[in-house]
Image: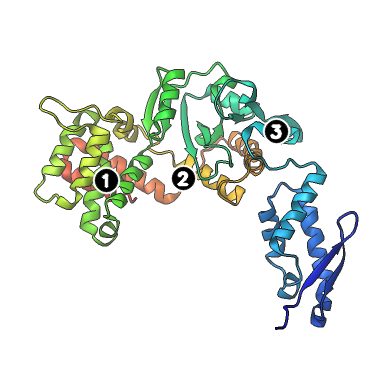
Amino acid sequence: MKRDQVAKVEFGRDDNVVKVVTKHNHPAQAARPATIRLINEVKERATTTRESPQQIIGNVVAGAHANVSSLLPKKNSMKKLIRRAKQEQGAPALLRNVEELEIPESYQQIMIDGEAEQFLFYDSEHELLPGRILIFSTRSNLHILAESKEWFADGTFSTAPTLFEQVYTMHVVKYNAVFPVELKRLQPVLRPTQLMTDFEQAALSAFNMEFPGITKTGCFFHLQQSVWRKVQSVGLKCRYESDREFARWIKMIPVLALISEGNVSNALDELVENEEFLEETRPIANYFEDVYIGRRLRRGRQIPAFPTLLWNVYQRTLNDQHRTNNHVEGWHRGFQQTCQLLFPNIYISVYSVLERTTGYPQLRNCAINLWQSWKCKKQEICISTRVKRIAEDYQTKNVINYLRGIAFNFEF
């Protein structure tokens, strides 16, 4: 049997490529210089960027000609080369547990307007706490946090670094724009009056403990998503996507959040008792009742997991206040794009936070200098306008027509 052709790359003492040797592969001769340049570029990126080995290989090799890429070492060999180059340059090695984590000086500071400022404000390394907590921010962001009365908070698991559970961000509104900032321990004079967050019990309990007087509102988008997850879990996803009438009744259930708070319970009864109500949607209505309203008893209702006061956004709609945390979700999507992968290592994660934070001073200056609000998408403005107009006519409409009119504007 004839053995496959092989290629060998020889490195000098300084790890620069000095020769590419192939076995009787004369057509590849012209590609050798390009191959050497490509591998040296990989090494250079390893020492001058904080990209992961996977990112470096993808960025450098993606556009290479087939004649060149065929001469490159195997992927695992390339990764070893990159890791060796990083370690020789002083980049931190990857971790096996959080106890080994030491944040390098370059990751503890951020460059703003050409000057280095503190970026790592808190590390629980020497405290008797389970796991490890790191808090990153800037002085200006902490001042904005202290001045703001309305906060937005949300966490993400998909881009949490390995060995960590979650990335949790705080955002505030200033100049009608939403900026990411961070936390109380770093700026003790904080008196927020309003908080919008998801329905994570641990986060809600923490805010209750630290800010007992704060008014909390659950994100309407997360409320819809909880209903959508239930639709999927009971096997109704295909029916929802193929049956417009069925989908409309499903969408009317979370829209109960836009009913006047004191009338939500009765509105649910009217919805499920309507003669046109589809029985196939009852499991979803029962789920919503159990979790968000409370199952009806002989006298009153059971206490739900999330009381109506938390998730009702009727008054916020009339007041032109935010109903969702979508801008926070947008930041998390951008953060994931910066990381370029799910569950990155801690150094890629911190570097990505640095990259995204660096841009915000310029954005703030733009908002301050121009003194104008950031524009929402035209479609979002149209939807908000229609929903508010319907909400203002709430007293003149019957419940079913009201819910149907608002549900028309939303999709899961």
Q: What colour scheme was applied to this rendering of the protein?
A: rainbow
Residue at which label 3 appears:
103
Mark 2 residue crowding within 10 angstroms, few (<14) / some (14–19) / many (20+): few
Note whether residue 326 is visible. yes
Q: Nearer the viewer, mark 1 or mark 3?
A: 3
Note whether residue 211 is visible. no
Q: How far from the left and from the top, in percent, is residue 234?
A: 27, 51
Mark 3 residue crowding within 10 angstroms, few (<14) / some (14–19) / many (20+): some
| Label 2 – label 3 distance at C-alpha | 38 Å
Amino acid under label 1?
Ile
Residue drawn at (82%, 64%) of the image = 37
Question: In terms of sequence position, does the residue under pointer 1 or pointer 3 come before the other?
Answer: 3
Instruction: Examine the image and state in which quarter residue 351 appears.
Output: top right
Mark 2 falls on what kind of element? loop
Q: How far from the left and from the top, in percent, is residue 65?
A: 72, 73
The one nearer the camera, 33 or 119, is 33
| Label 1 – label 2 distance at C-alpha | 20 Å
Mark 1 falls on what kind of element? helix
Question: In terms of sequence position, does the residue under pointer 2 or pointer 3 come before the other?
Answer: 3
Check residue 376 in the rendering and tell me which mark sits there, or answer none. Answer: 2
- Give the side of residue 286 with respect to residue 228, left or right: left
Residue drawn at (22%, 48%) of the image = 404
The one nearer the camera, 55 or 16, is 16
Question: In terms of sequence position, does the residue under pointer 1 or pointer 2 come before the other?
Answer: 2
Residue at which label 1 appears:
406
Q: How far from the left and from the top, in percent, is residue 373?
A: 51, 38
